[in-house]
Image (spheres, rainbow, N blue to C red):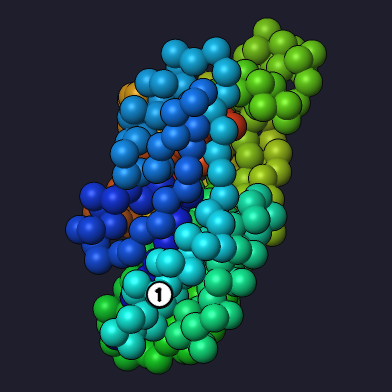
Amino acid sequence: MIKVLVDSASDISKAEADRLGIELISMQISFGETDYSDGVDLTSKEFFEKLIESDELPQTSQINEYRFEERFAELTANGDEIIAIVLSSKLSGTYDCACRAAEKFCGKVHVIDSLNASAGERVLCLYALSLVNDGKMTVTEIVCELEEKKSKIRFLALLGTLEYLKRGGRISSVVAFAGEMFSIKPVVSVEDGEVKLVGKAMGSKRGSNLLTQFIDKYGVKFDMPVALVYSGLSEEYLIKYIDDSEKLWKGKTDSLPKYMIGSTIGTHIGPGAIGVAFFAE
């Protein structure tokens, strides 16, 4: 049997993983002196409630080699094989830890660097699960297919605020102040495993239009997994965006699954962001 394991940077919760038949390993997050297992004893909603109330940014921790080794041993004990999909190696040391742990399992564990995060990692995981459930490919064939297709994933997001990038030291206070003053809405993308600024617009309406332009340029492959995400405590902005960008979806799909961004990415972007992850045409 082949099992799919994913880390919680994918924003797949424990409850959802159990329902889908996915194995989950959690990132750790700390608010002050209190530690939580992301997606297990701290939901995305609870995370944003704490983030908004907190004066200091929480700290996220990569999954170390020992935790991976422990989980791999548990999942392979009956002879099963594992495909482990993890957060981009350019954003965390989690991938390296997973690879070192996998070396001890005689080829039973296959680690894939998603080169993505959040919804981008999610859609790769869901595609892996569909291939496993289909039962027509060997584990080696599935791994090769995932390695090939992951380069087609596009994860684009429109940020609602620059405050958390400033608090995390990713941009200067001057840039953040100017951005807030002129209501600059940046569009970011995960490219080659890194988060990059790909455009910016003044105001939410222009920002939404810019996000739509990028998605339209790539083209969404609707026979593959798609995920729409939002950060914060309300999905209202994402629902409005879906309505405003109707031309992207109308007549092409009956389902637009919506998810809340979790702590790994939410720590850095804060509330008010929306994003779309998909396989490009």
The x, y position of residue 166, in whole percent, is 69, 22
Q: Nearer the viewer, residue 74 or 60?
A: 74
Q: Residue at x 56, y 44 (%)?
A: 61
Q: Quadrant of residue 78?
A: bottom left
The quadrant of the rendering that contains the N terminus is bottom left
Image-quadrant location for residue 123: bottom left
- Taking the spot 54% from the left edge, 76% from the top edge, the residue there is 102
Is 226 or 195 nearer to us in this picture? 195
Looking at the image, is 181 positioned above or below residue 265? above
Crowding near pointer 1: few (<14 within 10 Å), some, many (20+)? some
Residue tagged by mark 1?
A: 73
In the picture, measured across the screen, residue 258 lies left or right of residue 20, that is right
Q: Is residue 7 visible?
A: yes
Rendered location of residue 6, percent (x, y):
42, 61
Hey, what amino acid is under mark 1? Ala
Q: Position of residue 11 (x, y in %)?
A: 41, 47
